Image (tube, rainbow, N blue to C red):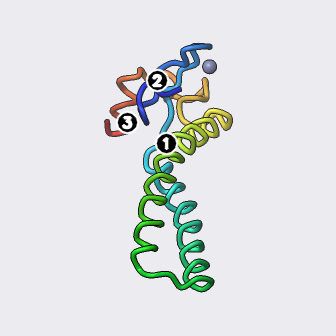
């Protein structure tokens, strides 16, 4: 689905489905922040309550974990959201919508790219 870390192919390389109709926009980072935030803040509070470690332990533990989890989740969440848009026939994924006629270039412009 992706040709780079977060760049979606215009067409599926296997079945040639037009993927450029997606409008993932800001949703993937929003969902990732929500999930990672809950895990990190919950973990931080638990570790502080249970072990009360030195401050540097929190810094060394939670900052890299936040970065790694966010980067690992972003492509998966973005793919999931685009899959949901496709399954619900949102935007140009609905063959009867006016957006279905747009070109990959029109879709890029509509996404502000
Ligand atoms: Zn496909």
| Front position among marks 3 and 2 | 2
| Front position among marks 2 and 1 | 2
Q: In the rendered image of this protein, does residue 74 appear above or below residue 82?
A: below
Q: Disc 3 marks which residue?
A: 110
CB of mark 2 near ligand 1 (< 8 Å):
no
Residue 9 image label: 2
Pick out the residue farthest to the right: 87
The quarter in which the C terminus is drawn is top left
Disc with the residue nearer the chain's start (1 vs 3): 1
Q: Secondary structure at mark 1?
A: loop
81 vs 4, left or right, is right
Q: Quadrant of residue 40?
A: bottom right
Residue 31: x, y in percent? 54, 55
Q: Secondary structure at mark 2?
A: loop
Find out whether the residues at labels 2 and 1 contact each other: C-beta distance under 8 Å.
no
Residue 12 image label: none
Residue occupying image coordinates x 47% and y 66% = 61
Callout 2 crowding tier (Cα within 10 Å): few <14, some 14–19, many ≥20 = some
Q: Disc 1 marks which residue?
A: 24
Q: Quadrant of residue 110?
A: top left
| Nearer to us in this view, 71 or 104 | 71
Q: In the rendered image of this protein, does residue 37 appear above or below residue 82?
A: below
Disc with the residue nearer the chain's start (2 vs 1): 2
**Tally of numbered discs:** 3
Disc 3/disc 2 C-alpha distance (Å):
16 Å
Residue 83: x, y in percent? 62, 35
Find out whether the residues at labels 3 and 2 contact each other: C-beta distance under 8 Å.
no
Callout 3 crowding tier (Cα within 10 Å): few <14, some 14–19, many ≥20 = few
Residue occupying image coordinates x 44% and y 45% = 25
| Front position among marks 1 and 3 | 1
């Amino acid at each position: 689905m992706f040709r780079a870390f977060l760049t979606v192919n215009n067409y599926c390389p296997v079945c040639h489905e037009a993927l450029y109709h997606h409008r993932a926009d800001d949703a993937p980072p929003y969902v990732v922040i929500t999930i990672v935030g809950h895990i990190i803040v919950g973990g931080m509070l638990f570790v502080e309550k249970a072990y009360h470690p030195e401050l540097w332990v929190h810094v060394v533990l939670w900052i890299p974990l936040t970065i790694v989890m966010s980067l690992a989740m972003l492509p998966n969440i973005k793919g999931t959201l685009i899959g949901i848009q496709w399954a619900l026939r949102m935007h140009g994924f609905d063959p009867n919508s006016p957006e279905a006629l747009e070109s990959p270039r029109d879709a890029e412009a509509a996404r502000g790219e």
